[in-house]
Amino acid sequence: MAMAISSGLPACSVVMATLMVLIIQAQGITRHYDFDVQMAKVTRLCGSKSIVTVNGQFPGPELVAREGDRVHVRVTNHVSHNMSLHWHGIRQMQTGWADGPAYITQCPIQMGQTYVYKFTITGQRGTLWWHAHISWHRATVYGAIVILPKLGVPYPFAAPHKEVPVIFGEWWAADTEVVMSQALKVGGAPNISDAFTINGLPGPLYNCSAQDTFKLKVTPGKTYLLRLINAALNDELFFSVANHTLTVVEVDAVYVKPFTVKTIVISPGQTTNVLLTAKPVNPKANFYMSAAPYSVIRPGTFDNTTVAGILEYHEDPSSSSSFDKNLPLFKPMLPRFNDTKFVTNFTTKLRSLATTKYPAAVPQTVDKRFFFTIGLGTLPCPKNMTCQGPNGTQFAAAVNNVSLVLPTKALLQSHFTGLTTGVYASDFPAMPLSPFNYTGTPPNNTNVATGTKLLALPFNTSVELVMQDTSVLGIESHPLHLHGFNYFVVGQGFGNYDSAKDPAKFNLVDPVERNTVGVPAGGWVAIRFLADNPGVWFMHCHLEVHTTWGLRMAWLVHDGSKPNQKLLPPPSDMPKC
Ligand SMILES: *[C@@H]1O[C@H](CO)[C@@H](O)[C@H](O)[C@H]1NC(C)=O
Ligand SMILES: *[C@@H]1O[C@H](CO)[C@@H](O)[C@H](O)[C@H]1NC(C)=O
Ligand SMILES: *[C@@H]1O[C@H](CO)[C@@H](O)[C@H](O)[C@H]1NC(C)=O
Ligand SMILES: *[C@@H]1O[C@H](CO)[C@@H](O)[C@H](O)[C@H]1NC(C)=O
Ligand SMILES: *[C@@H]1O[C@H](CO)[C@@H](O)[C@H](O)[C@H]1NC(C)=O
Ligand SMILES: *[C@@H]1O[C@H](CO)[C@@H](O)[C@H](O)[C@H]1NC(C)=O
Ligand SMILES: *[C@@H]1O[C@H](CO)[C@@H](O)[C@H](O)[C@H]1NC(C)=O
Ligand SMILES: *[C@@H]1O[C@H](CO)[C@@H](O)[C@H](O)[C@H]1NC(C)=O
Ligand SMILES: *[C@@H]1O[C@H](CO)[C@@H](O)[C@H](O)[C@H]1NC(C)=O
Ligand SMILES: *[C@@H]1O[C@H](CO)[C@@H](O)[C@H](O)[C@H]1NC(C)=O
Ligand SMILES: *[C@@H]1O[C@H](CO)[C@@H](O)[C@H](O)[C@H]1NC(C)=O
Ligand SMILES: *[C@@H]1O[C@H](CO)[C@@H](O)[C@H](O)[C@H]1NC(C)=O
Ligand SMILES: [Cu+2]
């Protein structure tokens, strides 16, 4: 898993080399990737199936770049499914055309078509990831994005001996497209998954899977940087390595004040870089590294299995000595599946570095305040259907009671060309139209409204948004992801947000900066961001089941007056609907 980074330096004089370093630092280089979307047959659990992949790899190829580099990914779709890829967490300054969510910023790449995603990595370093952003294809179409600091710039922590991506996934024995469409046909909840995976491997706790186990070989005394990514579709996860601690140093490609824990919490969409230091002396033992879900919903309605990988000690990492199953094996104790107290304790530890070198640019003043309810609901059953949702309805989910219906044309194109009639309206509600006791007894009428509405913002608006979970059909934690921006998590709490009392407790000094945050189950979270990136930006729950039910909306950020404040024109190879 060691990374090979070609420096691109010619072997000439030291002066020339230094100059080149300075130029590369200032301008970056262009990195080219070819992503061929193709089917591949893989064997997992006790069966095999054909899955959609990039380049036949599962998980997909790792994308490596330095801060400041340009990245060109040529995506060619060889499968009969429509495809679209998202570079999760990449800011995409002025390049919304490369963001990827289908029917939001682009039409899908259809079979036989090619689209080159072009973007520059600006002001970010750490771990992000890429994934399909259409239907449920991200179940198998995902991979790591490793953003190294600019050449010559060190990490704000001791350089690790090795860096290893650790990607959590979720596996269904059935075809996930069938799982999803079956659920939509009857308005019910989709079948839960059969396993979780680490780097695509289910590991020893599942049937027929001992051979498919992720193994991390470590040398005594060395420190490893684990680049953790939660690519699971529908589950927030706890992760722990038996008898070892994890020092959190970065989340969502932003450095944080380091802190050390036994167990971390990671929601779908989030990334977390942790340092793991191997014991100084070979302990002559093996250690499970395990992940299992955090969920407050009814047991039986989510996949409550545990995935394990194995941490092995080797004095000499180059030796080919294999796993010694005769050594004692230690297992970590993960919190109980519904331990919200543990989750809150963990999330409140996350703080931006907020140093001169890595300042926390928290908006200190607010131009516009918004309040969104985040929750589930229902839609009446159409006459020609028999529905399996609550009381014979269809499950739905909404933001401020609007369940977003995807258009048949891309929103960004409609905005850019001005041909918006019949595609979207710009009247997304800034607050609930019918307020209720959000975490108390829910209204009897659980129906949501449907529509394609955007919330428009002038360029450089300083936004404060409070997201409030509701108890409609039961409280639940929702990891909300915003495209095109990072935001600062300035406050969170349980019960109903109190606009008179709660702002006094906001952290405007060193709040964590990220792109995905859990709206606490039965609580609220407050975020702030500066709308300095023109375009149409998707915001949605990163639990795929909720996104499918409509827990999604989009912001429209208008151009600013200066040339570098405008959305660039669309690339000529933009897919068409
Ligand atoms: C989902 O679960 C139901 C009930 O167990 C089963 O009948 C159905 O075949 C499953 N769907 C898929 C796609 O596996
Ligand atoms: C493993 O297989 C057995 C026998 O078929 C089954 O009862 C059990 O539920 C399976 N366990 C897992 C974790 O899938
Ligand atoms: C691992 O932790 C367990 C439980 O805390 C302890 O009993 C055991 O001695 C530890 N083993 C090693 C090798 O550190
Ligand atoms: C929070 O976590 C720390 C360890 O990370 C632990 O020492 C402390 O007791 C926890 N606090 C609560 C309230 O659970
Ligand atoms: C998962 O949930 C099912 C159904 O509630 C239960 O029977 C099973 O014991 C649980 N498994 C684990 C590993 O918690
Ligand atoms: C967690 O679940 C267990 C078993 O379902 C239940 O007894 C317990 O009350 C739950 N805890 C919380 C905090 O909801
Ligand atoms: C029900 O009718 C609607 C509208 O006529 C149609 O779009 C939909 O496909 C039908 N659904 C089923 C399950 O037949
Ligand atoms: C379903 O109907 C029952 C009885 O009519 C009612 O108590 C319950 O609140 C309803 N649930 C939903 C989700 O509408
Ligand atoms: C909202 O509901 C909660 C829980 O039932 C209750 O404690 C609280 O008093 C209610 N708030 C209002 C304003 O009615
Ligand atoms: C919900 O329905 C119950 C029983 O039908 C009724 O007593 C109650 O007032 C209704 N609540 C609301 C908020 O309409
Ligand atoms: C949500 O919208 C539906 C459909 O318009 C409506 O029936 C329901 O009362 C609304 N609920 C809330 C809480 O606004
Ligand atoms: C693929 O996308 C195009 C454009 O939106 C649409 O017309 C077509 O029906 C889609 N094909 C499939 C197989 O979903
Ligand atoms: Cu959700």
Image: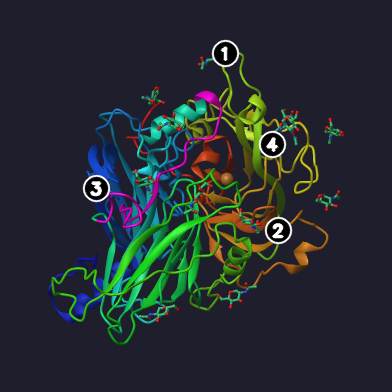
| Amino acid beneath label 2 | Val
> Pointer 4: residues within 10 angstroms few (<14), some, or many (20+)?
many
What residue is shown with label 2?
Answer: 366
Give above or below for 239 relative to 533: below
| Amino acid beneath label 1 | Asn
Q: Secondary structure at mark 2?
A: loop
Which is nearer the eye, 259 or 250?
259
Question: Along the polypeptide, which appears first: circle 1 or circle 2?
Answer: 2
Q: Residue 314 placed where, x, y %?
A: 22, 77
Magenta highlight range: 185-210
| Dots 2, 3 in contact, CB < 8 A | no
Q: Secondary structure at mark 4?
A: loop
208 displayed left or right of 533: left
| Amino acid beneath label 4 | Asn
| Dots 3, 4 in contact, CB < 8 A | no
What residue is shown with label 1?
Answer: 384
The chief SS type of the magenta part is loop
Figure quadrant of the C terminus: top left
- Residue 197 part of the magenta segment: yes
Question: Along the polypeptide, which appears first: circle 1 or circle 3?
Answer: 3
What residue is shown with label 3?
Answer: 57
Q: Residue 395 placed where, x, y %?
A: 60, 32
Q: Residue at x 47, y 33 (%)?
A: 103
Gap in angstroms between the C-alphas marked 4 and 2: 25 Å
Q: Residue at x 57, y 68 (%)?
A: 346
Question: Along the polypeptide, which appears first: circle 2 or circle 3?
Answer: 3
